[in-house]
Amino acid sequence: MQRTFSRRKLFGALFGAVTIISVDVSVANAQTAGGNLIVAQSSNPPSLDAMVTTSQASRNITMNIYETLYGFSEDIRPIPILAEDVEISQDGLTYRFLLRQGVMFHNGKEMTAEDVKASLDRYKQHGGTGTMLEPVKSIEVTGDYEVTLTFDEPSPTFLEAFASPRAPAVIIPAEEAAKEPNEIEFIGTGPYKFVEYVPDSHVTLERFEDYTPNENFEGIDGFGGRKTAYLDTVTFRVIPEPGAAVAALETGEIQMLEQIPVPTARRLASNENIKLYENMPWAFLTFVFNMKEAPSDNPKFREAVQVALNNEEVMGIATEGLFQLYHGWMYEGSPYDAGDIGQEYYNIADSERAKQLLAEAGYNNEPFSILTDSNIPEHGKAAIVIAEQLQAVGINATVNQVDWPTALNIRLQDSGWNGWTLMMGIEPYLGPVALISTLTGDQPHFRATDDQLDQLYEELISTDSEEGRKEVFARIQQRLYEFFGVVKLGETGLMQATRANVEGFKPFRFPRVYDVWLAE
Amino acid sequence: MVADTEIADVRAIKRELAKARRRGWARFMRRLAAHGSFKIGFALFLMIVMLALCANFVAPYDPNKSDYRSILMPPSLDHWFGTDGFGRDIFSRVIHGTRVSLGIGLAVVVATGVLGIFFGLLAGYVRWLDNLLMRIMDGLMAFPGVLLAIALAAALGPSALNAVIALTITFTPRTARVVRSSVLVVRELPYVEAALAVGAGHGRIIFRYILANSLSPLIVQLTFVFAVSILAEAILSFLGVGPPPPAPSLGNIIAEGRNYLQDAGWIALFPGLAIAAAVLGLNLMGDGLRDVTDPRMRSEREAG
Amino acid sequence: MIYFLLRRLASALPVLFVVSLVSFVIIAIVPGDVTAEIAGSDSTEIQRAEIRERLGLDRPLHEQALRWYGRLLQGDLGQSFLLNRPVTEAVLERLPVTLSLAGLALVLAIVLGVLLGILAATKHGTWLDQGSMSLALFGLSIPDFWFALVLISVFAVGLGWFPSGGYVPASENFWGWAKSMTLPALALAITQMGVIARMTRSAMLEVMSQDYIRTAKAKGMVRRTVIFKHALRNALIPIITVIGVMTGVLLGGAVVIESVFSLPGVGRLIIGAIQRRDYPIIQGGLLITAAVFVFVNIMVDLAYGWLDPRVRHGR
């Protein structure tokens, strides 16, 4: 209810009658091969060694170059990509991956089980989400096109974790897999191959003529499916200034903009040379407490913050109007959506109750330092609005805005910060396990562990039916609204744009430049 | 006996000098008051300073109060300079931001002045330190332009204090050089040699003679340091290493407005004009001061 | 002359030593390190410790410094943590962008500044004089990156005459290079144009009031000849003296302009390296940039000595 209200009020009104192009699979125009596409994004990919980095800027590019054995479909289920199939034993202790045959690497060699084993071994050592393969006891080549993973104990959510694009477990040639992180040649099996990377300038890809499409599918589906490269080359240009990037789109110097500021989208809505795409929901915007530092070590104090917040205002300003309000820790209507649990605490902006809770907490004007960074605009803006709202209920809130690496460094300390604004892009998309794993274990976001939450997480990953996991997740959401270690502020969207002659583009977790072509 | 007459001579010299200084001071002020561009610059700068000092009374809104209902409003009667992405009043932010930017500029001027005098005197007066100090200054000046300030501010982290530190380290070597070279000239002047000869204390010589005579090039230099600091603060903020939001500075208002160039150009426009006005005022004042104090430049003007 | 050159080159060494010390100070004060960038924001402490050990970041700073100087003596600036290539290569590859930006800006500043200065001096006391000087003063007073944003709005988006950013190597496409560099160079040049216009004007006025010019005029020489042959030539000498300083200002200012126009220059490389804690690039980038600047200054001194007989004989 809140969700539709806010969206209509804000965004609908802004765009008026203009239609935003939605995901539409049936495109009438005929595909044409050839042409060069230039995509702009705001930051450099820190690495093109796909498996070692979790950066979105890298993923945007690498997922067009490399492929994984399994990946997510459009509706976030694991589907085979380089694998033909997987056979899971009854006891859940062995996974036998059957590989597709005849798949070529960009270096002209065929992918075999040796390459897969070498890649997974490398992932275990250097992978960005290295813990994912921790339960795997051994990785064996059991045939030319067959790799078998064995486990000590069943791990029912393994395939979801394995398919995760967070730091994708991509398959590279065995000789590259022997190299240290960031020292490989960028060779994959994807529809585009790497040509050059000039940091601070661009990454160029070109069509891989010997690409082996996956015949098991009709068209593209999530990270997999049957992919076709139409374009001759694709260049990802790094343009840090949003104004300059928009200017380049308007003048036609670039054809695709990975993220376009919402006010600009509003202005360009009537421009017939430009198509806009709304990628919603894209991420959670959250506010994480440091549960080891006063005053945020006190649950009553944290509850006071939760009820003091006017989430609509925070989200409206932080996202420039492209947002949804929802209290749930999974997207509304998604399989794990836990319903109304916690709703009574969300977006209530009740300053009387907040003041009362502060009095109960014995709060005595101790400073409350909000850590944030300048690199991700939503973080900084949300922090500023939160500080203002907390000051209004009598909390001595200050904003400490630093750069991203510094923020990451500070938030790993037990002291020196009280609150931290964080966008969680990929975790809510991946599902409850990926999300809750960031809040449990040795290094939870909120520093102190919550024993009950840890137990619930263990229960979640060892429950083998989806029904059972849903029930556990509902209790997790219940628990999150009991100790208030983290506030869900809301959900953000991602506005993307292309020139009008770019056809076939469907917004996704990364800009898929295959199955995209340029109209005459 | 001989010493007595010398002392008498020195006293006479000092009297003359004091008189000359008073006369010089009066003439200096007269000249300055008659200098056209100095007057314009002074008036402009004074007006900006007054606006900044009275920011609390002049600004119609709280500069940090976001207003969710009036985001990105173009200039209007309610908001003369429009509003930003938080719905904050740009006019109020520019006025408060001017205070922050001028404050940073002033802090840099004071710190650079004190350190510049200290190191300049040390280098010019203590011969054995000269070489070492000047090599260090040269090293700091080998970083082109504001690169050193940017690098230091990026390393120290974004804050107003760190911006002051970074800019002070960047501009001190230049100031110290100015002081040093005038010390080198002044200490060769006959009356200073005379004072040295009669054994006047070093402290006395430094403050009565050397410093007093180094002051005018220093003031000219510091006026320009003030102007450059205001520009540099904007650069630091633009690169995200200046004074951080939410408190406005002219630089970080522009930095926030850069994302809305086509859609809400007013956000970046007005603080840019405010910087231009403040720097223009300071430049005009600096020109005037230099014309009046530097005889060589004066002759050029008179020639023209 | 050779002796002078060698002496200047030798005196540059302690300067560059101080530069390298400052780069260590920067590394010492910057919080955090490169590991989160390499391993991702959610990497474990064990993963990060492994990377630290591999890169030698677990050693005390003075030890890292000694090793760095040891390698420097062999002409090796080390390997970038993030770019997977030698620092020298990464910096030298970026240098043409920054140098061509600063160089073009210098040329623009001199040409426009001198023209403006001549105009003001020859029309001394008229509205043209005042207009040119106001323009020069305005150029001196506006923030150059802000002017760059204005240029993009007007000439790239509004009129579509120039690209809004990006770099085209001159070797690939000269016309494309010229187009991509025009707005950045203009934005960067505006301040120095003001400086030069004002210098030219006062130098011209001084020269024109001197006896030999008066004599030349009295002898009935054509006015244009007087201005260009005698007055201008003498007025240009002080401009050469400031080219060294000006190069510094332009190289420093290029950092911001590179970022506005998304040009892959050395400035952005260094700032990016500080932000991502890529220490070898910070050290190598600062050292090479400073070395270029020092070298330009030596060249300017040489040129000055060669051009101005007074200085030549004075030495």
Image (cartoon, coloured by chain):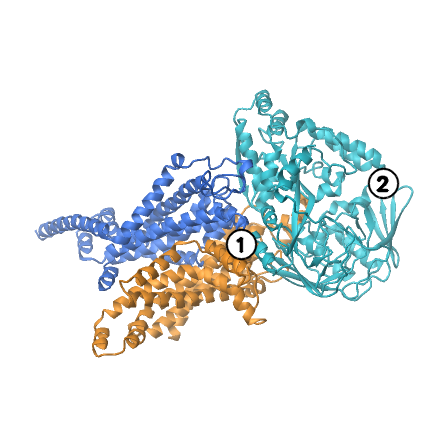
Q: Chain letter for mark 2, please.
A: A
**Residue extending farthest right:** A90
In the rendered image of this protein, which colour is used for chain B?
blue
Q: Which chain is cyan?
A: A
Question: Image quarter for residue B161?
Answer: top left
Inspect the image, locate mark 2, and give the three-letter code of the amino acid beneath it: Pro
Kindly identify which residue carries mark 1: C271
Q: Secondary structure at mark 2?
A: loop
Q: Which mark is residue A358?
A: none
Q: Residue at x 53, y 63 (%)?
A: C162
Q: Residue at x 52, y 39 (%)?
A: B87
Kindly identify which residue carries mark 2: A154
Q: Quadrant of the C terminus of chain B?
A: bottom left
Q: Which chain is orange?
A: C
Foreground residue, A292 or A243?
A243
Q: Residues within 10 Å of mark 1 (few under 14, many from 20)?
A: many
* Left or right for B190, reference A173: left
**Residue B140 visible in image:** yes
Q: Secondary structure at mark 1?
A: helix
Inspect the image, locate mark 1, and give the three-letter code of the amino acid beneath it: Ile
* Left or right for A247, reference A459: left
Foreground residue, C314 or C164?
C164
